[in-house]
Image (cartoon, rainbow, N blue to C red):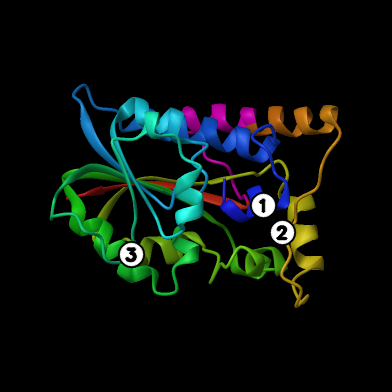
Amino acid sequence: MDYKDYQAGATKDFFWHKAKIQLISILLNKVKSDKRVKILNVGAGIGDELPVVHKAGDLYVIDIDPNALELIPQEFVFEKKVCDACHMSYPDSFFDSVAAFDVLEHIENDIDLINEIYRVLKPGGFFVFTVPAFNFLFSSHDRALKHFRRYDKRTIKNRLSMFKCIELGYRVFSLFLPVSAQRLLNRKSFAHEVHFMRLPKIVNNIFYYLLMVENWLIKHRIHLPVGTTIYGIYKKV
């Protein structure tokens, strides 16, 4: 969860974040190794996905925001440090996997971060990520979260051309229309506000189960036609 979402009142029970953690588990299981590995989590936010990520190996966590790192329990990490992700203090080919969930959009020159991820990954290592989809949905919500852009598949493929694409797809197809409508209504707003709405429990649960169905499809490599998020697994060759 982004630290600003947390500040706006989002909780770990919010359907979006619960389903995202399940997706992260699915993606990491697709690159799971039989041996103990080193995993770098870039921009971990408040670290709500770390109980899932750390099961895959020794987990290193970096974030530019020391307040976010303060919220991350030490029990889940081998190391956590305040660090500029575009200038990491790790040697070449150090990590077996790098995870960046909703991070690339926060970096003004995302090519610098991608090159740095490529550098610290071992040959054969995996880059697992999510990013917000479709720049026409860029709204006051993105500005509040300090996003520089949203992405489409073509942009991702161009940015990650030095990697081999293992899997690339969309998520949040079932709620694409209402989420898109909200974003478009706020597209021209100059207010910087996080679009977080407290939902009745039954509505929150319905939305969660819809995304759980999507996660099941993703787990079985059934790609959705569109969505508000892009997920990917790329390999350093």
Foreground: disc 1 or disc 2:
1
Report whether 172 appears left or right of 51. right
Span colored in magenta = 212-227
Report whether 139 appears left or right of 202. left
Residue at the spot 74% in from the left edge and 71% down from the top edge: 187
Residue at the spot 76% in from the left edge and 28% down from the top edge: 205
Q: Is residue 107 above or below residue 166?
A: below
Q: CA distance from mark 1 to mark 2?
A: 9 Å
Q: Is residue 167 above or below residue 34?
A: below
For disc 2, the marked residue is 194
Tag 1's secondary structure? helix
Q: Where is residue 161 drawn, in percent x and y?
A: 29, 62
Sooner in the amino-acid sequence: mark 1 or mark 2: 1
The numbered dot on residue 61 is none
The numbered dot on residue 7 is 1
Sooner in the amino-acid sequence: mark 1 or mark 3: 1
What's under tag 2, amino acid-wise?
Val
Answer whether residue 213 is magenta in the image.
Answer: yes
Q: CA distance from mark 2 to mark 3?
A: 25 Å
Answer whether residue 224 is magenta in the image.
Answer: yes
Tag 2's secondary structure? loop
For disc 3, the marked residue is 113
Q: CA distance from mark 1 to mark 3?
A: 26 Å
Report whether 213 appears left or right of 51. right
Do residues under tags 1 and 2 come within 8 Å of each other at their CB atoms?
yes
Report whether 77 appears left or right of 229. left
Foreground: disc 1 or disc 3:
1
Sooner in the amino-acid sequence: mark 2 or mark 3: 3
Q: Nearer the viewer, residue 8 or 155?
A: 8
What's under tag 3, amino acid-wise?
Leu
